[in-house]
Amino acid sequence: MSAVTIPQNPLLKGSGLPPFTEIQPEQVIPAFTQLLKELDQQLTTLEANVQPTWNGLVEPLEKLTERLYWSWGIVNHLMGVKNSPQLREAHETVQPQVVQFSNKLGQSQILYNAFKELRASNAWSTLELAQQRIVEAAIRDAELSGVGLSGEARERFNAIQMEIAELSTKFSNHVLDATKAFSLTLTAKEDVDGLPQSLLSLAAQAARAAGDENATPENGPWRITLDFPSYGPFMQHSTRRDLREKLYKVYITRASSGELDNNPLITRILELRQELADLLGYKNFAQLSLASKMAPNVKAVEALLEELRSASYDAAAKELAELKAFAAAKGASEAEDLQHWDISFWAERQREAKFAFTTEELRPYFPLPQVLDGLFGLVKRLFGVTVTAADGQAPVWHEDVRYFQIADETGKPIAYFYLDPYSRPAEKRGGAWMDVCINRSKTTEKDATFVRLPVAYLVCNQTPPIDGKPSLMTFYEVETLFHEFGHGLHHMLTKVDYSSAAGINNVEWDAVELPSQFMENWCYERPTLFGMAKHYETGESLPEHYYQKLLAARNYMSGSVTLRQVHFSTVDLELHDRYHPGGDETPSQLRHRIAKTTTVLPPLPEDSFLCAFGHIFEGGYAAGYYSYKWAEVLSADAFAAFEEAGLDDEEAVKATGRRYRDTVLALGGSQHPMEIFKAFRGREPSTVSLLRHNGLLNTAA
């Protein structure tokens, strides 16, 4: 590549909105070759001139890391939403160099000593609380990054970090490829018996995309995939038990054999994590993981999980017995011996019978544009901020991506976000997430001080618009959107001016889900629900009887849902706490053993759920999956503050909303989450609200 074109590489812009329309996979390698060289020189210069002061250490270091995060963040974002063989290859080439540089940065003895000097200096008392937390975290992170290691130990530590990064990416790619590799093309009408219109349309669209250009929702062929908007509804509605079984078995064995087998990767990742913990002087990876979390120790996490397990186990067993009785009453031959592939189907039939509505019936009342109006109306009411469309003001990576602005009470912009709502199985990984595009921070340039506004990515995987209709959402998809938007608000409504503690930065991992889970509660609140639930064709509001049924159905199967989360959390914790890689038990056997007390319908022998458990093998939830439940205790208790103030009292809702905004959302990582929670709630959190919201309070007594 000639020297002339290098400066024009869009990945080297280094600040502002990413120029997505200009970025190509072939630019990744040249960009990082140049960037890492420059950053390496900057690090050397910083080490030579470092002063143990805020301006002489923290600010220049932040500038340096921000350049790396800006460019690397874009590449990682595109890996999730616009995956391609070319991008993967470039990512694979560059990742080791990025990990290498991050290790070098994290292990700089000079910077570590400077941070410790700053903490011990007289200037320490003049720093704001947020600044002190940033310095404390930098010291802790350096120690967890192996700053105390030297010689062979440090080399080994770095080699492990590198290998784990490669294995995580490989794990993720295997799951994506295995999900993509399977599809079931159905041609006969009886094969699609029971399937709702929305799934028939989606399946016909998938068939057309795969080359059957004449496929129609009425006559097929219909292509069913393992992508959740296709798989989920199929399992709920297909009357063909044989096909449900086939699909279920493929789904639970994804990435567990052949070229895409994640089993060896899991074993290796667990071995490496244990070795990492040993090197840093921790007994195991769980202890290492909790060193930077809100939960004080493994015991405290186990105590919470056991409290939730005992509150939900009997409820889940009762739910399964009721489901069997229901299937028997309907004359189902499988009633006595309900299998995993029957649960979704019969649970949906029982829900319809109990509450007299189907999840499908509600879809027409939740078109995406309307749901966004309702969501934006709610945040205006609670937090006084206004969301408006800003499409066209930022380059996007796909034509379906939207761009929005958030303004405060005075109309001044305070944040922006992208929304990428629809499922694209060929290039986008499943699930939903919020990610940081730009952090808020105060910067001074040429004697002028200005605040750089935060920008977020909000990514969902809901049913796309089909056959001229808007995206009609299931209620679960509505809850998911609210959840991710809660993360977004945490990032966007921060008042912290130091990017290392702004928004979700420096927030203990097990407190990060508080704002997201908090938002889900509002989906059931009358003004919010009726503000968005309007029929996409007629504009009529959701009939009252549906609302009452939604409320009644809210805790349907809640014992099973809670127990499922407890199961995943316990497996994760045990794998990183007591499990010994290479011992008598495989990770899969460990999971099946734990299932004896954490499931009421034990997993099938071939169930390889761990092979697709991306949260802990590719995401950041290793020995931290319990965080969902830990934070749900906080979020349920936070919502209870609004209930106690009175949800019918508009002034009280506003006042509580402002207090929540000024504490939980505004303070970001500038204080310990427990202090922030107490500032909002006036006391420490209690599990009572969560058990009450889940209808499990009586069983816990």
Image: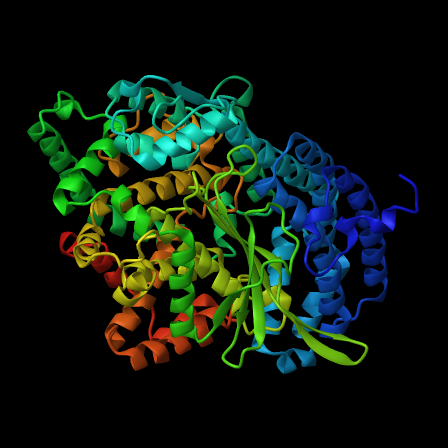
Viewer-nearest residue: 189 or 131: 189
Quadrant of the frame with the N terminus: top right
Please state the horizontal and vertical placement of residue 490, each as a whole percent of the image. 49, 64
Please state the horizontal and vertical placement of residue 603, each as a whole percent of the image. 30, 28
Quarter occupied by residue 249: top left
Horizontal arrangement in the rendering, residue 340 relative to residue 663 (left or right) = left
Residue shown at the point (73%, 66%) measured from the top left: 114
Horizontal arrangement in the rendering, residue 38 relative to residue 121 (left or right) = right
Please state the horizontal and vertical placement of residue 658, each as a whole percent of the image. 41, 77
In the displayed orientation, state which residue is furthest to the left: 329
What colour scheme has been applied to the protein in the rendered image? rainbow
Residue shown at the point (45%, 58%) measured from the top left: 485
The relative height of residue 344 versus residue 513 in the rendered view (above or below) is above
In the displayed orientation, state which residue is furthest to the right: 3
Looking at the image, can residue 650 be seen?
yes
Quarter occupied by residue 384: bottom left
Viewer-nearest residue: 362 or 251: 362
Horizontal arrangement in the rendering, residue 670 relative to residue 476 (left or right) = right
Quadrant of the frame with the C terminus: bottom left
The relative height of residue 61 versus residue 18 in the rendered view (above or below) is below
Viewer-nearest residue: 63 or 407: 407
Residue shown at the point (21%, 37%) measured from the top left: 347
Please state the horizontal and vertical placement of residue 318, each as a whole percent of the image. 13, 40
The relative height of residue 441 versus residue 332 in the rendered view (above or below) is below
Looking at the image, can residue 505 be seen?
no
The relative height of residue 399 versus residue 176 in the rendered view (above or below) is below
